[in-house]
């Protein structure tokens, strides 16, 4: 073993003392491996990031609803008071202490008193900004402290705790608590979302592996000539291979150092990366011990393995280097076997898939199948390029130069574009999954933003208060029209189990809730659901006596009787969705027909039409709601909404895709520059013999375009096949989004053009006469 270790050490020394060429080769390998290591360390940090994030999220939550909890020295009243300012979500909590030792939220040193609040750093900065005047009017509390990182999900989160002396328990909005924190309950993912997560990881990390493998091959031709010189002075073939392995090992270890440095240097950038509505604390990006150890061991091992595998096709003799010039065609059987095995694993997973959720074993199996399929594209691409360019003949001079170069070293050209081929193939499969998930997770809300643009809702203690609230919204600048209603649950006087709703509003509002032929003050209507599933007239016909007090919504116990009889003149009508998409079937009544003060904990709903030319109309409406009560919630009406888990996956994939594309672009640029450096003398000689520089530039373009075009064709076929298999796995219909696929292919072509353009200055420099100098 001592001679073997000595050979490895000698290879490492050559990487350091090999002069300018050795340093450059080591630097290229270190940069290539370092970029891959940095991205792998970031991926290995995701579990720690999510664990810390969820721990802080559940530490500040409190879903406690124990009505038996009595006021004491360690209790307080707690209520949500979220708002939005110009599309920026702001979360708030209203607190009223009931004793001397109330529980403290995480990150807060003191419970704010009435008229006071503690805020997150990001919210403090927002409130201090010049254009936040309307927000300052809404959050008019005095700031007495800043919430520390322990109580926030991210550095950009807008969050506050405000004190109150009038907050009362009840109404389903405020309740008594004696501690903060709730149990972390993981919501199971739908199989389609599980597939999206699995495939997102595969698509983002597979190109990284391809790039890392390509990085350890930089400068291979000069390394082989150096090894031939060593053979001339007495080294045998085995020693030459061990020296090459030592050089690759040293470059990969340098890559680990570079990758760790890049990761640490880029960690602060995490504070601007969005995730589920806020950004990330850089301190949360910490890779686990075992993943880090695996990366540190796998990278050098892969570098040595790839180097030894590459040298199998090279004969290094004392008088020179002979590559596989015996025109030994690449074997194709194992290249086809890889995707075949991958498709078999996916098909097997399809037969074992659970109807509710993919199990852990299935997830690993699916990931392995997808990786093998994408790896098959990487392995098949060199064979396809070799088979194609071997048949190319004739054409313009630039084309002939390009095809001849590809015929001599098609493997190098294929490796250059392998990363983008894998990325495009995986992206096509993921986009097919997103297209299938879009209809399930981006749903229509039933809201009609053309009829109204906002709705304010709140549970009130007395329905007599609502008309004053409606009047205040009518007086708000930018609010054109207001439709207000009061609703509450009621029961039959003779049967507490028979429940319906009573909705009270003026005739103009009632016409928005049901199809009315006529309406005047004092009328009562019995509204049935438009789909016929709820026929209110059968259980609550005219003449039925109702108990308006129903039961207490907090304790569930019956309250005192408040009898009210449905007028015998009440007409049967069909309900229709209001602008907010809610169907108010049940009893509809005008104000003079019923005493709303007798309703138990009624809800107020105020729908508003806003001035489309006033960008601050929504903010003024929110300010009016906050003046009425911090518990009143103003919601904009939208036609569609996204599932939270689906939106988080989309955001995460977007961030990862941008990072991966940057890595692939860096890979292609480094590979192109390394190839041009290897061919410096040849390019200078061609120019010296009279070859025009534009011809050489076009030849560089063609020798990049041919393998890229073939790679994108394989990527399109593989991506469609992988996406079809995954959709069949979860039983979703197969759809091909040709527009998205063409866009992805266009991104691949654009990347090639950009890389070629960036390589032109280096190409022009390599064609200067001093490139003919030889030591």
Image: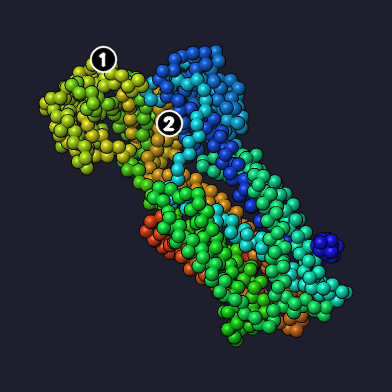
Task: State the image coordinates of residue 450 (x, y, percent, origin top left).
Answer: 33, 43
Task: Give the residue displayed 48% in from the left and 68% down from the top.
Answer: 717
Helix, strand or loop under label 1: loop
What residue is pinned by disc 1? Answer: 560
| CA–CA distance in space, label 2 to label 1 | 36 Å
For residue 152, side relative to residue 224 (left or right): left
What residue is pinned by disc 2? Answer: 622
For residue 582, side relative to residue 86 (left or right): left
Task: State the image coordinates of residue 300 (x, y, percent, origin top left).
Answer: 72, 58
Identify whether 525 is placed above or below 651: above
Number of marks = 2
Task: State the image coordinates of residue 72 (x, y, percent, origin top left).
Answer: 49, 13
For residue 611, side relative to residue 335 (left or right): left
Q: Quadrant of residue 66?
A: top left
Q: Nearer the viewer, residue 672 or 4?
A: 4
Task: State the image coordinates of residue 563 (x, y, percent, origin top left).
Answer: 20, 18
Which quarter of the rendered picture does the N terminus lie within? bottom right
For residue 6, side relative to residue 279 (left or right): right
Q: Nearer the viewer, residue 350 or 36?
A: 350
Task: Give the residue displayed 30% in from the left and 37% down from the top.
Answer: 582
Q: Nearer the viewer, residue 620 or 435?
A: 435
Is residue 465 something one can see in this rendering?
no
């Amino acid at each position: 073993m001592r001679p073997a270790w000595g050979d490895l050490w000698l290879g490492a020394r050559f990487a350091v003392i090999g002069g300018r060429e050795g340093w450059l080769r080591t630097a290229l390998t270190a940069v290539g491996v370092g970029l891959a290591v940095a991205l792998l360390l970031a991926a290995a940090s995701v579990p720690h990031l999510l664990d810390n994030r969820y721990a802080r999220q559940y530490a500040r939550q409190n879903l406690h609803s124990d009505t038996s909890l009595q006021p004491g020295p360690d209790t307080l009243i707690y209520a949500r008071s979220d708002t939005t300012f110009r599309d920026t979500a702001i979360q708030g909590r209203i607190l009223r202490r009931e004793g001397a030792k109330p529980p403290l939220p995480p990150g807060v040193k003191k419970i704010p008193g009435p008229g006071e609040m503690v805020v997150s750093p990001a919210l403090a900065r927002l409130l201090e900004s010049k254009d936040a005047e309307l927000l300052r009017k809404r959050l008019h509390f005095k700031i007495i402290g800043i919430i520390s990182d322990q109580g926030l999900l991210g550095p950009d989160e807008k969050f506050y705790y405000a004190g109150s002396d009038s907050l009362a328990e009840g109404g389903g909005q405020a309740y008594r608590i004696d501690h903060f924190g709730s149990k972390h309950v993981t919501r199971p993912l739908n199989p389609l979302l599980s597939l999206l997560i699995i495939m997102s990881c595969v698509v983002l990390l597979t190109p990284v592996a391809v790039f890392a493998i390509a990085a350890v091959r930089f400068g291979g031709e000069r390394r082989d000539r150096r090894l031939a010189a060593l053979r001339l002075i007495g080294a045998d073939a085995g020693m030459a291979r061990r020296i090459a392995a030592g050089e690759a090992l040293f470059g990969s270890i340098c890559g680990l150092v570079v990758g760790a440095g890049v990761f640490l240097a880029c960690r602060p950038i995490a504070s601007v990366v969005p995730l589920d509505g806020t950004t990330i604390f850089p301190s949360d990006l910490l890779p686990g011990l075992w993943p880090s150890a695996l990366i540190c061991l796998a990278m050098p091992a892969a570098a040595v393995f790839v180097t030894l595998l590459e040298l199998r096709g090279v004969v290094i003799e004392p008088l020179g280097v002979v590559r596989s010039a015996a025109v030994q065609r690449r074997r194709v059987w194992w290249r086809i076997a890889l995707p075949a095995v991958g498709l078999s694993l996916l098909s097997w997973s399809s037969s074992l898939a659970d109807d509710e959720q993919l199990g852990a074993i299935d997830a690993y199996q699916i990931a392995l199948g997808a990786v093998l399929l994408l790896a098959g594209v990487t392995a098949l691409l060199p064979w396809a390029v070799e088979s194609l360019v071997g048949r190319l003949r004739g054409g313009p001079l630039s084309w002939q130069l390009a095809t001849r170069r590809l015929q001599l070293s098609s493997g190098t050209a294929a490796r250059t574009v392998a990363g983008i081929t894998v990325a495009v193939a995986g992206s096509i499969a993921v986009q097919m999954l997103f297209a299938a998930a879009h209809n399930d997770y981006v749903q229509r809300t039933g809201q009609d933003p053309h009829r109204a643009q906002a709705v304010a809702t709140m549970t009130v203690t007395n329905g007599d208060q609502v008309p004053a609230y409606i009047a205040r919204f009518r007086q708000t600048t930018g609010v054109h029209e207001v439709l207000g209603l009061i609703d509450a649950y009621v029961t039959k006087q003779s049967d507490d189990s028979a429940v319906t709703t009573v909705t009270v509003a003026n005739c103009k509002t009632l016409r928005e809730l049901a199809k009315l032929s006529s309406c005047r003050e004092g009328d009562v209507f019995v509204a049935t659901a438009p789909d016929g599933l709820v026929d209110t007239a059968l259980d609550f016909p005219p003449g039925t006596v109702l108990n308006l007090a129903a039961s207490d919504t907090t304790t569930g116990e019956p309250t005192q009787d408040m009898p009210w009889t449905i007028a015998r003149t009440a007409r049967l009508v069909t309900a229709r969705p209001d602008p907010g998409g809610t169907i108010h079937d049940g009893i509809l009544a005008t104000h003079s027909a019923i005493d709303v003060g007798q309703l138990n904990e009624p809800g107020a709903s105020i729908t508003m039409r806003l001035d489309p030319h006033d960008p601050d109309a929504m903010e003024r409406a929110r300010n009016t709601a906050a003046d009425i009560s911090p518990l009143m919630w103003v919601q904009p009406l939208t036609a569609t909404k996204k599932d939270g888990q689906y939106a988080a996956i989309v955001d995460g994939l977007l961030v990862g895709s941008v990072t991966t594309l940057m890595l692939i672009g860096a890979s292609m640029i480094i590979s192109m520059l390394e190839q041009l450096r290897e061919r410096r003398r040849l390019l200078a000689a061609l120019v010296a013999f009279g070859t025009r520089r534009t011809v050489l530039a076009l030849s560089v373009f063609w020798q990049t375009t041919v393998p890229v075009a073939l790679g994108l064709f394989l990527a399109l076929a593989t991506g469609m096949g992988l996406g079809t298999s995954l959709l069949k796995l979860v039983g979703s219909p197969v759809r091909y989004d040709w527009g998205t696929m063409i866009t992805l292919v266009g991104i691949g072509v654009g990347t090639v053009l950009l890389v070629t353009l960036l390589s032109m200055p280096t190409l022009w420099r390599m064609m200067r006469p001093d490139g003919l100098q030889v030591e």
